[in-house]
Image (spheres, rainbow, N blue to C red):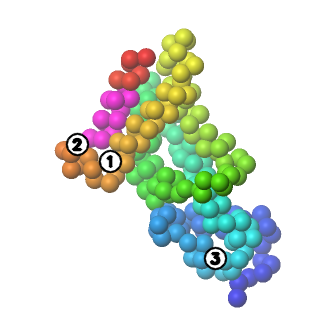
Amino acid sequence: MGRRSDHSRAELEELILAEAHALMAEVGFARFSAREVAKRIGYSIGTIYNVFGSLDRLVLAVNSRTFIAWAGLVRARLDAAGADRVAALVEAYFDFAEANPNLWMAIYDHRLPPDAPFPEGYFRQRAELTGLVEAEIAAILLPAKIGTAAALARSLVAMVHGHCVFALNGTFALLGETDARGAALARAREVLAAQ
C-alpha cells in the first residue's frame, strides 16, 4: 500500500517529477511508465494521476524540466563564449543531446492527442531555450533583417537537430560523415553569412 500523507501536494509533485525525470533519463520514452515512478517513490499510481492528471501531463512536465536544464546549459555556454557564439550554440546542442540522450529524445518522441491542450506555461518554458537562440541570431543579422530572426532561428535549430539525430543514431557514420558537429556548424555559418 502506498504512503498517504508523508508529503504536501507541492512536495509530492516535486518528488514525482524528480523521480519521473530520473526514470526517463534511465530508460527513455518507450520504456517509461507512471507505474514504475509510483513504485520507486512508494506511492500508488493513483497518486500520480491525482497530482498530474494523466501520463501525458507527467511526460510534459518531465520534458519541461529537460528544457529548463537544456536552457541552463546553453546560457552557461553563452556566458563563457568568446566571439564565436554560434559555435557555442551548436556545441551546447550536441553536448546536451549526447549527455542526455533519453531525455532529449523524449521531447521529440512524445505526442499529445490532437485535441489535447497543452498546459499553461508549457510554451513559455520551451520558449526560453528558443529565445536564447533567437537573440543570438538577431545580434548577427543586419538591422533590416532582424524581423526574420525567429524564423531563421527555428530553421537553424532544425538543421542542427537533424545533424545531431544522424550523429547519435549512426546514420552519418553510414554516410561516411566523421564530423557531424563540424558539418552542422559549417552549414549554420553558411546560412548566416548569406543573410
Q: Amino acid at mark 3?
A: Ala
Quadrant the N terminus occupies = bottom right
Q: Image check: 14 left or right of 186? A: right
Identify which residue is drawn at 57% across, 19% down.
147
Identify which residue is drawn at 34% across, 52% down.
168
Residue at the outermost left position: 176
Residue for badge 2: 177
Residue for badge 3: 38
Residue for badge 1: 166
Q: Are marks 1 and 2 in contact (CB under 8 Å)?
A: yes
* Extent of the magenta region: 178-189
Vertical arrangement, residue 34 with respect to residue 62, above or below: below
Identify which residue is drawn at 56% across, 18% down.
146
Q: Dot 1, how many residues are within 10 Å of its Cα: few (below 14), some (14-19), or many (20+)? A: some
Which quadrant would residue 55 be assigned to in this image?
A: bottom right
Q: Please tell me whether mark 3 sits on a helix, a strand or a loop.
A: helix
Q: How far, Cα to Cα, is label 3 from label 1? A: 34 Å
Q: Please tell me whether mark 1 sits on a helix, a strand or a loop.
A: helix
Dot placed on the residue nearer the N-terminal end, 1 or 2: 1
Indicate whether residue 44 is drawn in magenta: no
Nearer to us in this view, 30 or 82: 30
Q: Please tell me whether mark 2 sits on a helix, a strand or a loop.
A: loop
Vertical arrangement, residue 99 with respect to residue 143, above or below: below
Identify which residue is drawn at 46% across, 59% down.
102
Q: Image check: 108 left or right of 112? A: left
Which quadrant would residue 62 be assigned to in this image?
A: bottom right
Residue at the outermost front position: 115
Which quadrant would residue 58 be assigned to in this image?
A: bottom right
Nearer to us in this view, 173 or 110: 110
Dominant secondary structure, magenta: helix
Dot placed on the residue nearer the N-terminal end, 3 or 1: 3
